[in-house]
Amino acid sequence: MPDRRKRADGDATSGTPQAPGPTHAATEQEPTDTAPAPDRADGPPAPEPQENQGDLPPRRGLSLAVYLTSATLVRSASGGAPVALVALTLRPGHGGAALGGVLAALLTLPNIVGPWMARWLEDARDPRWRLAAAFVVFGVVLAATGLTLDRLPVVLVGLLVVVGGLCNPLMTGGLSSRLALIVGGDTRAQRRAEGWDSATYGSSNILGPLAVAAITAVAGALHAVVALGAAGVLAGLLMFALPKEHRDAATRQRSMPVRDALKVIVRKGPLRRVMVATMITSVSTGGVMVIAVVFGHQLQGSAGAGAAIGAAYGVGNLCGALLTGVFPLTGEPERWVLRLIAANAVAVGLCALAPGYGFALATFALAGATSAVLFTASLAVRSVHSPPNARAQVFVTMAGLKMAAGSAGTALAGTLVGIGPRLALCLNALVVASAVSLALTDLWLSRRRSTAAGPEAPSSPAQ
């Protein structure tokens, strides 16, 4: 059952924002909390949400379906774009794979400005317009890149790609930050929706490259790029089918400056612990595909076997996300994050110990499933503990840091796999386990500080 303890910002497990009040003005001053449970309330207790077993009213159910369709389209366009750009440059006279790699890098580089893009989203009277604009711009720029690659100087084409990359943070964390406002205040419905949202990431990473491969084989890389661009435009138009957030100038709370939002992530215990733990875990997950290809080749003697192990990880990831959509997580989400990181460490360790190819397929699928459920739980932590006036910034910043750690993990895996995939997997399991140790140490220190500050500070037993 959902945890019934309260926070000043709203119900702890639902993440429903309360009316702005004096406590929000000093969010960055909030003391470190004492347990994975939400921080103690600074004001009157929030009303208890009504439990309805996660069933959405028809109107909200339709809005969620529209949201998931738009998210799948735009994230598939984003996931397939690097593959499409490389395929585009492989055509005779179009720069070759080196240029494709540069363009793919330019598409992800602008993620570093994600917090500022998120603040731009939060300051909107109606965020749908800015999300729609970002999706449409991404789609148009992607299609324009394909159409102008052999007609404009490469520098101008690169600038086009950077403009498209600026939209990326709003397509990931920015979009996810609006989900709870669409679903409403019911805890179970929010956790279920976060599971489906997680599934859009997993499915898009499969559908995007798959669509590029299929369209390129039939009609050519240019048509694949234009098709991805059209998917982005359609996703933007679908934003207007979502319910409007009713926020006028009198009730709209101005978003936090980026520096203050970063302070909130660092000072608020659950956000800090989950951010650090998932960044460390992403070092492992970022390199899993590289290791899978080498490991499969070692076990079976063919590159196809390695690709199949990578595919098993992707299928497990998607199944894990879908599972949380059908059976949503309950209780305090930070505890789920710590348990799932531990489960992921065990799964990666089992991958290293796989005696044969069939066992390797199963263990990599298990690792993918635990990673997906972990991601869903981390979305719930962001939703529960983000201040209302820094919600998008928290989502985007934590997503961006996780992606950066994943990129570092990919590069590191390329180096470590040379000493053997089993040893690389063992090291990855140790890295993931260290994330749990660090989080638990942080939690223990936070409780000690809270106890020393005064006996009136509540403390929940460790679980």
Image (tube, rainbow, N blue to C red):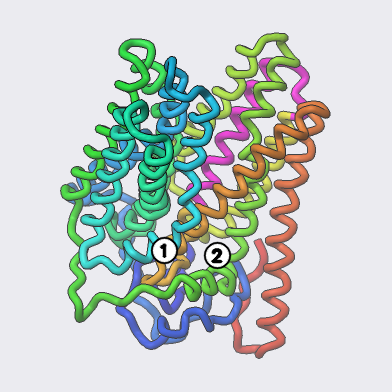
Give yes or no for contact between labels 1 and 2 (Cβ–Cβ under 8 Å): no
| 280, above or below 34, in the image | above
Residue at point 36% right, 29% down?
Answer: 149
- The amino acid type found where label 2 is placed reads Leu
Q: Is residue 72 visible?
A: yes
Quick check: 334 left or right of 219? right
Q: Position of residue 231 (x, y in %)?
A: 27, 33
The label nearer to you, 1 versus 2, is 1
- In terms of secondary structure, where does tag 2 sit? helix
| 31, above or below 55, in the image | below
Residue at point 62% right, 34% down?
Answer: 367
Quick check: 349 left or right of 15? right
Which quadrant of the figure contains the C terminus? bottom right
Does the stretch in magenta take in 361?
yes
Question: Mark 2 sits on what residue?
Answer: 271
CA neighbours of label 1 inside 10 A, class few (<14), some (14 to 19), many (20+): some
Q: Nearer the viewer, residue 222 or 448?
A: 222
| 284, above or below 444, in the image | above
CA neighbours of label 2 inside 10 A, class few (<14), some (14 to 19), many (20+): many
Q: Earlier in the sequence, mark 1 or mark 2?
A: 1
Residue at point 56% right, 54% down?
Answer: 401
Q: Which residues are magenta?
A: 352-377
- Give me the disc on residue 116: 1
Residue at point 55% right, 35% down?
Answer: 369
Q: Is residue 199 visible?
A: no
Q: Position of residue 251 (x, y in %)?
A: 23, 78
Residue 68 quadrant: top left
- The amino acid type found where label 1 is placed reads Trp
- In terms of secondary structure, where does tag 1 sit? helix
